[in-house]
Amino acid sequence: MTLRFEHRGQLGLFTDGFEELAVDDSVRAAVQCGSPVAFSLSGGKDSVSISFAANRLLDQLGHPADRRVAIHANLGRIEWQSTPGTVEAAAERLGVPLIIVRNKSHDMLSRWERRFELGCQRYQDLLTYHLTGPWSSASNRFCTAEMKTQVILPELLRRWPDQQIVSVVGIRRQESLKRALTPISKAEGDRYRRAAGGHILTWHPGVNLLEEEVYTFIGQHELPLPESYSLGSTRHGCAFCVLGSINDITVAARAPGNRGVLHHLVDQEAKTTFSFQPDRWLGDVAPDLLPASLASDFAKGKALGAERRRLEASLPANLRYVKGWPQRVPDINEAAKIAAVRALILATHNLTTPYPTAQAVRDRIAQLFAEQRLKEAA
């Protein structure tokens, strides 16, 4: 094994299957002073392989092995059934203790259900122009924040409230346009600082790695992987991801261990009238796996979803939600249109509203408009 650093301290080369691990001055300083290091393990190929390589790099840098742990955020029912075993095996290969954490209020399935409940309440109260669906999305990844980041980092700070902690996260720039901008390390914000001095430095040692290098490294070192890959999935995390490709969603749907979750999510599509992904209904991915009653409910929900979108598209466009909504007060004719559309959508979900008439709708939006202008002026 050889190890080399460029003079400016931005690139660490690690030759043992991986050609390149990234290290910067902030990480090097934390390692040299023996800061605790936590390997974030999802069970996926990147988290397992990059943690293993980074662990060996830390040995080379003289970091004390007893200052390292692995940590995994259990996502509940939506996890692949092999994930817990894979994570345990990975931690054993790393030779470090494994910490399991979870959101104490929800798992991912119940979080989506609760989001729709809250969205319905806001729609009833005319706090939203359109009904809000349950699912997270590329522009609103509360799933990652609430189920992983906001669970893992507080736990690390609870254990080391007065120290800098290095959190190792295995993501690669090759994965997406957004991740192409991933820094080698970043200091987490004030939310993850403690009065006693505890704070988090997130380290991305594998940012420059390519997917083929990851698989080669895993093969060379016989590292554990979950069954999702052997079944044909390209990524691992939630069994059903709102950002997943058609291939990965199909693989997950046809895995017998995911059947209950598949039925649950399709049932939510049917009840909410919102598709799991913006351009894809999960119920259409493997229709032959749906019980007859669920298939019937899904068809009705999908049709109602199309009708909801048609109705919402007929609303006055320049009243649609933007930051600082509402931007103006509708006239009485526009308010009548809004009231009529809302009545149909509310009835679909057996909801009532204190704003059923055109005048009530106009008065409510006028109230919200005045409150928003006061807020902006403050």
Image (spheres, rainbow, N blue to C red):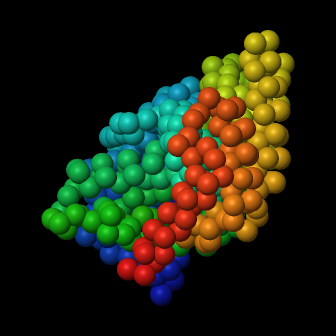
Using the rendered image of the protein, determine whether residue 193 is visible from the camera's viewpoint. Answer: yes
Question: Residue most toward the left?
Answer: 196
Q: Residue at x 32, y 62 (%)?
A: 192
* Residue positioned 67% across, 32% down in the render: 347
Q: Residue 6, relative to residue 2: is it above or below? A: below
**Quadrant of the rendered structure where residue 180 is?**
bottom right
Which one is in front, 338 or 79?
338
The image shows a total of numbered marks equal to 0
Q: Nearer the viewer, residue 219 or 349?
A: 349
Residue placed most toward the observer, 238 or 332: 332
Q: Position of residue 285 (x, y in %)?
A: 81, 31
Q: Position of residue 165 (x, y in %)?
A: 30, 61
- Report whether 21 appears left or right of 176: left
Residue 330 location, quadrant: bottom right
Task: Kindly tell me whether residue 112 is visible in this rendering.
Answer: no
In the shown orientation, is residue 334 left or right of residue 197? right
Name the outermost residue toward the top: 292
- Work out which quarter of the rendered image holds the C terminus and state it: bottom left
Q: Residue furthest bottom?
A: 8
Residue 125 image point, x, y percent: 52, 47
Camera-side residue of 96 and 307: 307
Q: Residue at x 61, y 54 (%)?
A: 359
The spot of residue 55 in percent (x, y) is 43, 54
Looking at the image, which residue is at 23% across and 51% down? Answer: 158
Q: Eyeballing the image, is 316 above or below 100?
A: below
The image quarter in which residue 186 lies: bottom left
Left or right: residue 328 versus residue 281 is left
